[in-house]
Amino acid sequence: MSLLLCKTVSVTKEDVCFDDGNDVVAKQVKRRKGEKEEEKEQQQEEEKKETTVEEKRKFLEGSVNLNDVIASTSLGERSDVKSDVTLPTIREPIFPLSGGWKSDKEYSDKEMQTDVIYNGPNDSDETDTSPKSETPRSLEDCLEIYQSQLGAKTLTNEEVIQLVNHKVITVYQLEKEVDNPDRAVNIRRQIVSFAGKFTKEITGLPYKNFDYNKVLGACCENVIGYVPVPVGIVGPLLIDGQLYHVPMATTEVCLVASTNRGSRALRKCGVTTCVIADGMTRAPVVQFPDIVRTCEAMSWIKQPQNFQELKNSFDRTSRFARLKKINSRIAGRDLHLRFIATTGDAMGMNMVSQGTQKSLQKLQTYFPDMKIISLSGNLCTDKKPAAVNWIEGRGKSVICEAVIPADVVAWVLKTSVPELIKLNVKKNLIGSALAGSIGGYNAHAANIVTAIFIATGQDPAQNISSSNCLTVMESCGVDGKDLHMTCTMPSIEVGTIGGGTVLPAQGACLGMLGIKGGHPTEPGQNAEKLARIVCATVLAAELSLMAALASGDLVKSHLQHNRYVSH
């Protein structure tokens, strides 16, 4: 701890010597002045030694304001001085215990991902918002400050790290302890990079200019930064009579360009979509003493009045979640119950889980010998390949179609309708069947689903079921020259509220599509529209890739556009 002390000399009437020609008087005045100055300096030194410890204790306890101390030791002593000399300006100190540290600005990253946050009109250079101290205080002093009302936020970064290393503060609670998410991320980076020996490598991971308040408790824990992913734009793509520019976040070369070519081929005919089912699922597994009781419970749930009672318990947990049905599967003494519900504009996993739990509690009042094994028994099925999602659907079940004229196929796609139809049968149908594919009867639906999911704040892991797609190509029109194309996607799991949709960049992408947040009058319409956009964009991408394969241009285009050279 360092104090800024200004040494001053007090001038009194006794110290003033007038020129009256009396050398004796002048000598007496000078001698008296020198004695008083010497006594005063000795007294100040003694007082300084006696009060150093006491002042330190008071500062640590927060009982003394440093600004008041500096004012009393400098300005107060100068109050009697009248001089033509300009006194130096006293600047407001920056001290970790006084609360006087301020941040004029936040950093501007050259790898910036979100909005730069400015706190003042003169923002330009980088500044450190953490409290400053010339040397870190001892562990005992830091612990005393941390346990006081001042808390960890008044400690420097080095002092906070010291408490983390001594297991006083846990790494995952830094945001709460320092009351500053940006500073917490910075401190955590220093700790983990030093421990993991990648202090140089972590500098390539940006962390500034990101609103971490939206991340805490919603998206991620133990945050050390963010990964910028390029976002390309596809379109305009004509979907149900409306033009959309679709954002896609990807690092795969040619993906956006190829999908854009497909949308260009569909510009005149457009894509028509239909949502045929909507229902997020959660499937708990419960157990009974014997198979007789298991069968009794299964039969009881199928009764309309009993289902209604479970539905009432479910629906009371949310303004938007509404239970539609419960499908049952028996495996020995175990009963797997697949709850299916609509969830408004949210993807809805949390809603359905909460409602399912309440319904099980109601079921237990009628079957007290029922044991809840797990809230999720994998019949849902979430984030795993599963035939149940392919057959019965999950989330939004969407179908889209387009009729592409033969001349567009020839001029834009550089191939022919018969070649596309033949390739689709050989590759997407027969090839996928030989591979034992579940829901993979397509060329690359997962590419588009994942790119849109990342751009719009969806759960990327749910591309597993969401990419289930059956691509069909048939001839149509006069003399069968035109191409009729459909994509059937039974399990698109999307939402426009919650999760990653709250982040600024992802929210901006949803805003570009006109579906940010919940629909103001018809809950569920925004999420449904997003599912339609996903399905239509998949069709555009399927059309373009299949044409590239049919014409033999796939490898050539990748080699042409992938200009990365390894050094």
Image: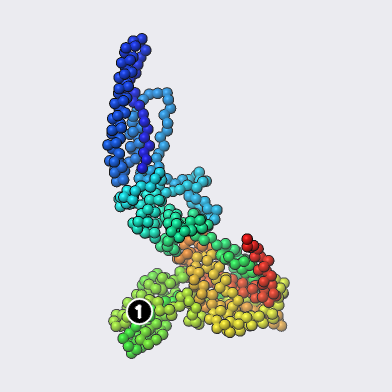
Disc 1: which residue: 373
Q: Tell me where residue 400 appears, x and y as whole percent.
A: 58, 76
Which residue is located at x 42 percent, y 62 percent? Answer: 221
- Residue 419 place in picture, x, y as percent: 69, 80
Q: Judge whether residue 512 can be spotted in this image.
A: no
Q: Residue extending furthest top? A: 21
Task: Please tell me in which quadrant of the rendered image residue 168 appears.
Answer: bottom left
The image position of residue 226, as x and y in percent, is 49, 60
Instruction: Name the one closer to the observer, 171 or 494.
Output: 171
Left or right: 155, with 202 as reference point = left
Residue at the outermost front position: 197
Dividing the image into 4 quarters, which one contains the C terminus? bottom right
Residue occupying image coordinates x 47% and y 58%:
197
Considering the image in quadrants, where does the N terminus appear? Answer: top left
Nearer the observer, 495 or 8 = 8
Q: How is the image coloured?
A: rainbow
Taking the image as drawn, is residue 167 in sight? yes
225 on left or right of 99: right
